[in-house]
Amino acid sequence: MASKTLFDKIWDMHEVKTIKDGPSVLYIDRHLIHEVTSPQAFAGLKERGIKVFRPEKTFATPDHNIPTINQHLPIADKISRFQVDTLTKNCEENNIKLFGLLHPKNGIVHVVGPENGITQPGMTIVCGDSHTSTHGAFGSIAFGIGTSEVEMVLATQCILQPRPKTMKINIDGKLDKGVTAKDLVLYVIAQLTASGGTGYFVEFAGSAIRDLSMEARMTVCNMSIEMGARGGLIAPDEKTFAYVKDREYAPKGADWDVAVQKWKALASDKDAVYDKEYYFDAADIEPMITYGTNPGMGVGITQSIPTLDSIEESSQKSYLKSLEYMGYEPGEEMLGKKVDWIFVGSCTNGRIEDLRVFANAVKGKKKAEGLTAWIVPGSQQVEKQAVEEGIKDVLEDAGFELRQPGCSACLAMNDDKVPPGKYAVATSNRNFEGRQGPGARTLLASPLTAAACATSGVITDPRTL
């Protein structure tokens, strides 16, 4: 039998049919939906008189449009309120499990799935959201889909999908103090560029990956999409099993033992061949910060913005356009640059470990004068933990406020928008023009780096804390 990668093993188990010279029909184990990309899909089903085929396989939560303060009040923005209400109505009509606003399990869809055991190794998972790749941290094939594909999965529990190529990214060695999973993945994206993974599904491997916690692995897989990849995944291990065990939707009793035995087989064969493979040394990575308008435009925090002569001639025009938007010049140092806004949250870094890191770093210090900070838990469960662990108190003592769960300032779809021209150090995943609000300037970083900037008011190396 030919050797297989982890990706190939899972794909082959879910391939219902292969269309000659075309896509595969892939069975989907879990379908996650939210208020932004599902309304048109449900409308399409209704128009065609089709029912949801397997509603028990679909889980819903509003996250993109919801406010992060005063969630007990009606949503003020009419469009946002309509989208959330439409999701509620569609779930009620189709018998779909909904974690609605203020539900104890509500939160960002890619935080809610793992923390409730909905996400499990060996599964195929889709959602009308590009950062579905997050769930690949559990050893699953997880990827974002478009609205017409959401409708397809609701109707058939299958999807037409071309088989992507495979890539393996090995990172060995130990991460230095102050260097996090977010820095690791921003470093990889900076090395490979924002299009370096296009057409591939990426497996992350190596000792540096194995050393990461499950929440840190989610950060890595979440950002795989930012190098153009279809998704990212990591082989499940004992850390994975320990994380999933006893969560609400995880297998129980004898079923758990059977599941773990199956999951243990989910690893790439030793002589498996990938279409492309890369090797990196964890010791080469320092805290990262982006300076431009895509996640590949990042440097180590002690480094300078690349000079124009180091950029390929064909890319120089767009490079200068990006720096003009950011108000930066080629060759400038990043350290000491002004920061106006801090955003800690999102499906990338809105989990309890992220809030712990930020709170530990600001404990006993004070928020920089004139700086605005939004600290946003990824779910109701994360918020509850933050209160119980005293994180909320630490934040308030330092001048910060813990907001309510939601996607918040990751994207300009709700009230949490960064004003034009302001510099925001964000723990989210994208720094495109206008991503956090029209004219907002986003610098992607880790929660630890965000904490260093939040107390100093300028870009600061977290290793100096």
Image: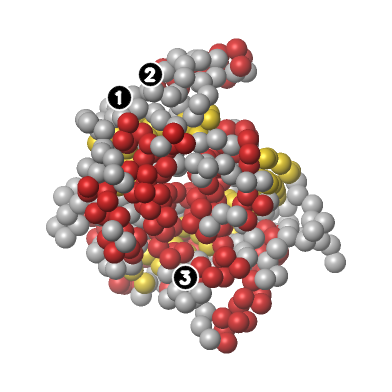
- On the image, numbered disc 1 is attached to which residue? 421
Residue nearer the viewer, 337 or 220: 337
Question: Does residue 210 appear left or right of residue 245 in this picture?
Answer: right
> Which mark sits nearer the N-terminus, 1 or 2?
2
Height in image: 5 above or below 184? below
Relative image position of residue 234 (x, y in whole percent): 62, 57
Other-residue count near label 1 (Cα within 10 Å), few / some / many at <14 / 14–19 / ≥20 = some
**Which residue was labeled with disc 3?**
117
In which image quadrant can residue 440 be found?
top left
Query: Please, what is the three-letter code of the amino acid marked with disc 2?
Result: Gly
Q: Amino acid at mark 3?
A: Gly
Relative placement, left or right, of 68 versus 348 is left
Q: Amino acid at mark 1?
A: Gly
The residue carrying pointer 2 sits among few (fewer than 14), some (14 to 19) or many (20 or more) residues within 10 Å by Cα, namely few
CA–CA distance in space, label 1 to label 2: 9 Å
* Mark 1–mark 2 CB contact (< 8 Å): yes
